[in-house]
Amino acid sequence: MEENKRLTLKIREFLESGTPKARISTVALCILTLASIPVLLFMASAMGNAVQVFRQFETSKRFKKEQIRSSVNSLRRQRLIEYVKNKEGKTLIKITSKGQERIRDFSIDLIEIKRPKKWDGKWHLVMFDIPVRFKKSREALRYHLRDLGFYQFQKSVWVNPYPCEDEILFIANFFGVEKYVEILTADKILEDEKLRKFFVL
């Protein structure tokens, strides 16, 4: 449930940002995901109802109805969503396992560490001891820490001057290694000149 909340927040932030970096099909999948979390289903008797779901988030103002219908049909052709009927005969739009993977992959790419106007002087340390059997997940976590601008303090200790707990837990959970990750906040790190220079503090 906590993971769904984080996923929802990241997708909402993206949709409300007005960022044009995603194709409409990605926006469509995001909105269908928001409409369906946590049960991954929502009621729709026709495609027109799907468009009304878009209106709830005011995203359809950026796109024509024809674009929206076309993008949702595209999602169906890619097997990211499917239509099913319930016992009452009503049509349901269901996000498939492939669709869930796509939206989670996309949400990972949205992660960023927000930089406040003024640094509070605290250091945030991400430490992990991930078993060898999770080698790919360990490497993926390192990749994302580096991509987010963390400083590698030691082999499995990374540092950032800004709050990052939710973001790191989101990534760790995504790769299934959350229980092997610890996040600490330190008021002081001895000889932090390299860190200050790295982060331009």
Image (cartoon, rainbow, N blue to C red):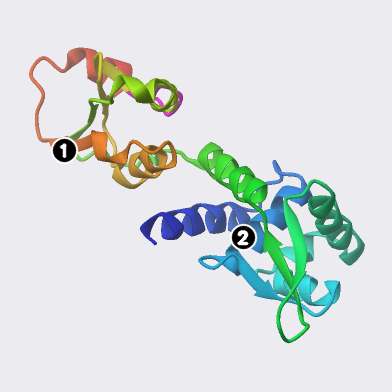
Q: Which residue is mark 1?
A: 185
Q: Nearer the viewer, residue 115 or 98?
A: 98
Query: In the drawing, what numbered circle is on residue 33?
Result: 2
Residue 122's place in the image compared with 199, above or below, is below
Question: What amino acid type is highlighted by mark number 1?
Answer: Thr
Would residue 191 appear left or right of 143 to someone viewing this image?
left
Would residue 21 appear left or right of 169 to someone viewing this image?
right
Query: Can residue 199 be seen at all in this image of the molecule?
Result: no
Query: In the drawing, what numbered circle is on residue 165?
Result: none
Name which residue lies at 69% across and 69% down: 58
Name which residue lies at 60% across and 67% down: 36
**Chain part drawn in magenta:** 145-150
**Place of residue 174 in the rendered image (x, y in percent of width and height, measured from the top left):** 44, 41
Q: Quadrant of the N terminus?
A: bottom left
Near mark 2 (Cα within 10 A), the count class, few <14, some 14-19 or many ≥20, is many
Residue 30's place in the image compared with 187, above or below, is below
Near mark 1 (Cα within 10 A), the count class, few <14, some 14-19 or many ≥20, is some
**Distance Cα–Cα, label 2 vs label 1:** 33 Å
Name which residue lies at 41% across and 27% down: 137
Name which residue lies at 26% across and 40% down: 179
Question: What amino acid type is highlighted by mark number 2?
Answer: Thr
**Place of residue 37 in the rendered image (x, y in percent of width and height, measured from the top left):** 54, 65
Residue 132 lies in quadrant: top left
Q: Nearer the viewer, residue 8 or 46?
A: 46
**Place of residue 52 in the rendered image (x, y in percent of width and height, measured from the top left):** 76, 76
Residue furthest to the bottom: 88
Query: Can residue 2 be seen at all in this image of the molecule?
Result: yes
Q: Quadrant of the C terminus?
A: top left
Indicate which disc, 2 or 1, sits on the residue closer to the N terminus: 2
